[in-house]
Image (spheres, rainbow, N blue to C red):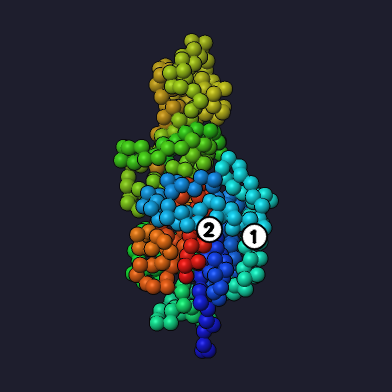
Amino acid sequence: MGSPERFEVAVLGGGAAGIAAAIAAARGGKSVVICEHMPRLGKKILASGNGRCNLLNENLSEKFYNTAAQPLVKNVFAKFGRRDILDFFERLGLKTYSDSGRIFPATNQSSSVLKVLEMELRRLAVSVELNFKVTDITSGKDGFLLSSGVGRRIASRSLVIAAGGRSYPALGSDGASYKFAEQFGHKVIVPVPAAVALMTKDRICHLLQGQKISASAKAIIGGKISAEAAGEVLFTKYGLSGTAILDISRDISVAINRFGNKGVKIAIDMVPFIKENDLASELKARMEKKYLPEEMIAGILPNKFGGAFADALKLQDASAIAKIFKSKDFVITGTRGWNEADFTAGGIATGEVDVTTLESKFKKGLYFAGEILDVDGCRGGYNLAWAWASGHLAGASA
């Protein structure tokens, strides 16, 4: 076996954080290689934002991230925040626009984002090793040695691990790199799916499958409201989805998948545009007009609801019926899997990296960026913003 090819910085992972890290390191004059186990770079970038790529959000406050990560996120954004990310893409020639605070490429195509990133990698002479699945990492006085399963080897002085979490394994994030962090003494907070659809055995979901409404939803864990959101609720054969559900799913996923909690519920207000007293008055008036039970909710909710809630609508108590539609409880039995989760909640404990450089506190020359850390944000460009910012900081520091 010949000598390994040597670089000053190796980046493990060719997603958003890894590419940003490689560009930052190369702009600093270092020789850089990206090791990516997929056949091309940036597959998750291409899929992000339903193919539009929600690059970041106008309001990049740390409050939009999980509590444990907020001190680290605040420090990273202080060094490379909203204006810096926008300048980064402007320098690459990407034009952007804001839609209700969410920033997208002017082309509305994620392929435009990946294209300008790849152009910059080429300009900076960053080496890209595709289909390079790292099976072993060793370290010594000269740095790190990365070995693949087919005998390819790369040596580097510094190493940035930006291989993502576990969401969308088909696009390259399979959690395989957590073991390397643990190898160097790091603790991995158990990863669970976030921004994910939820499962329930409530027959209402089966009766309403395919129906979408504007509603508000509350996550109830241990009898207490832990999160709430307004948006779309989609009823499916397995349970609940839609933006309102995705936005409150993190705490539920942690409770069920990480801690094994039972009795987790979601309460849905299916008619947020009507106060409960007003709804009760409307229903009472309909009762007095001798409406059929299946017609009691017509014009307020889609017609399907009349059949799905037939038993409840036969009640002669308008207030009781109103209460059902204003706060319908669903017992959550689980979440959908990694291939349907937008993000990963969990990863390398944030207290184990230097907040000013993202260098490991346990291994000199080792850096982390992106979703492999225990950092997850709300939907709306926050997770990609973290990828760009943390990747840039880690790469510039490596």
Mark 1 lies on a secondary structure that is loop
Circle on res. 211: none
State the residue position of label 1. 92
The label on residue 388 is: 2
Vertical position of residue 274 compared to residue 110: above or below: above
The residue located at (47%, 33%) in the rendering is 216
Q: Determine crowd level at label 1: few under 14, some 14-19, many 20+ residues with C-alpha closer than 10 A.
A: some
Q: Where's residue 192, x and y in %?
A: 41, 54
**Which residue lies at the image location 37% right of the left edge and 72% below the top edge?**
363
Q: Residue at x 50, y 50 (%)?
A: 382
CA distance for labels 1 and 2: 13 Å
Question: Residue at coordinates 42% horizontally, 46% vertically from top-left?
Answer: 63
Sequence-wise, which precedes: disc 1 or disc 2? Answer: 1
Q: How many marks?
A: 2
Q: Amino acid at mark 1?
A: Leu
Res 131 visible:
no
Q: Residue furthest right?
A: 107
